[in-house]
Image (tube, coloured by chain):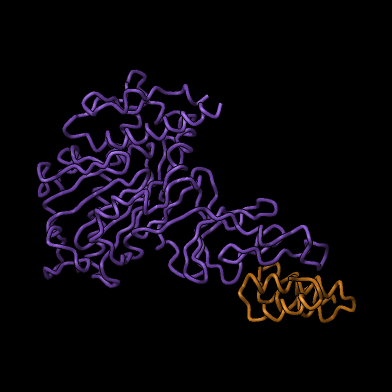
Chain colours: A purple, B orange
Amino acid sequence: MSAHITDLSAVRRHVSEAQGLPNPHYVDPAVFEEEKHAVLFSSWAGLGVTADVPEAGDAVPITFLGIPLLIVRDKNETVRVFQNICRHRGMMLVEEPRKIEGAIRCPYHSWCYGTDGRLVSTPHVGGPGQNTHESIDRNLLGLIEVRSHIWRDVIWINIDGKALPFEEENAELIKRWAEFDKPLFHGGADSKFQLKVNCNWKLAVENYCESYHLPWVHPGLNSYSRLEDHYHIEEPDLFSGQGTLVYRQLKGADGQVFEDFEGVGAKWNEAAEYISVYPNVLLGVHRDHAFAIVLIPDAQGQTTENIHLYYATPETDDAMRAANTEQWKLVFEEDIFVVEGMQKGRHAQDFDGGRFSAVMDSPTHCFHAWVAGKIENQRAQAHAAE
Amino acid sequence: MSTLDAQLLAAHEVDDRPALVRLYQDAAQMSFDENAAGFYLTHAYIFALELGHADTPALHAKLKAMGRES
């Protein structure tokens, strides 16, 4: 059925001849469903950050593309992701973020799980007061764990379990940012915020990829970081984004700055990079701070952006940290009208996916081509299976 | 058992789980029948397990000794 929804033949052409993804990739629930499997379940998608579960026993439920998931920091400090359901009757286990003091008890029949997912008790399963039964092998009935990996504090998940190991899949990017492979300290409550935007998740990625819009949409940013100070980052089928050569550190009231990440080279004195890690994580690195934006696709036209800021040291100046959050919040809020405007535009029947600037839009086209490739790959597999 | 019943209901009403651990152990102790005791101890154990309560290991050992837990 899905094999006939859209024609993607023009998307993977050279950027100078390509068309963008057709409208249904933004507005059609059937295509959203197809992309869910082909693009988001098959790759390493961002779900949250470990700072969401700072202490052992912390548990945060999150619905990702309709799947109820549970992020837990277990008693040994390992952050895991489970399907948020009891293996008995499929009951939701945890409805609100909370601390698991001992075990996760299902509110229905009280089957209990350790924070590491082991099934530890099955009360009355063999009759009143008889908590074992030969047909219930607890070793086979632990919580269903989702394949996950932590990098740059982001919790990445591979729902279908078939992607290459995270470090292999993202080897190029890990190598590119090796200098930033240092401890990251989340700035805390004042260093995270959430934006709810009425657009398909891909539009947020696409907008983040390119610097072309900066002088028009972010005039404040452009006053010191001009268009010509930016460069494209493109690794076909891996990631894309932009870099700047004129990053200026935020200064406090007495001229103080945030501490640099230890050992970050002179190359980064005035440089910074912003990369879309396909499919749904937007990362930024600077000599003295970093951020991660995890995009949660809520529906074909709705996305939640969870933004987190990080520093090189556990303690930072309160006022400076707040100013930095405010500065980035302003920038990201300035982008809302364009991603929402493009979403509305995708209902124009004769829009053909759009023509790219061969010079300025290649990082965005790089993402389109990756999405199209993932979908075509799944369609080919489905066709072969038939 | 009527006072204990009332205390159990009150503890359930306000979701006082530490109290439930204690009261279900009391109920087990007051039972003359091993099946009833096993039932109450199971409830005490499950609430203790959920809370990470100090009584958890002892309750587990008791149920295991009774052949009611693995």
At 63% from the left edge and 77% from the top edge, which residue is drawn?
B53
Return the residue nearer the eye: A9 or A345.
A9
Where is the C terminus of chain A found, in terms of image quarters?
A: top right
Q: Is residue A194 at all visible to an observer of this figure?
A: no
Instruction: Tell me: A116 left or right of A255.
Output: right
Where does residue A59 sit, x and y in percent of width and height? 51, 62
Q: Residue at x 32, y 54 (%)?
A: A292
Q: Is residue A227 visible?
A: yes
Q: Nearer the viewer, residue A35 or A63?
A: A35
Foreground: A325 or A376?
Answer: A376
In which quadrant of the rendered view does residue A201 lie? Answer: top left
The number of numbered discs placed on residues in the rendered structure image is: 0
Residue A30 in percent (x, y) is at 49, 29
Name the one closer to the observer, A61 or A223: A61
The x, y position of residue A64, in whole percent, is 49, 47
Classify B8 as above or below A139.
Answer: below
Q: Of all residues shown, which one is farthest toward the right? A: B32
Image-based side of A324 in relation to A62, left or right:
left
Q: Which residue sits furthest top?
A: A350
**Relative to B53, B69 lies left or right:** right
Q: Find residue B22 and report its horizontal and vertical position in percent.
A: 72, 79
Q: Residue at x 70, y 70 (%)?
A: B46
Image quadrant where residue B66 sits: bottom right
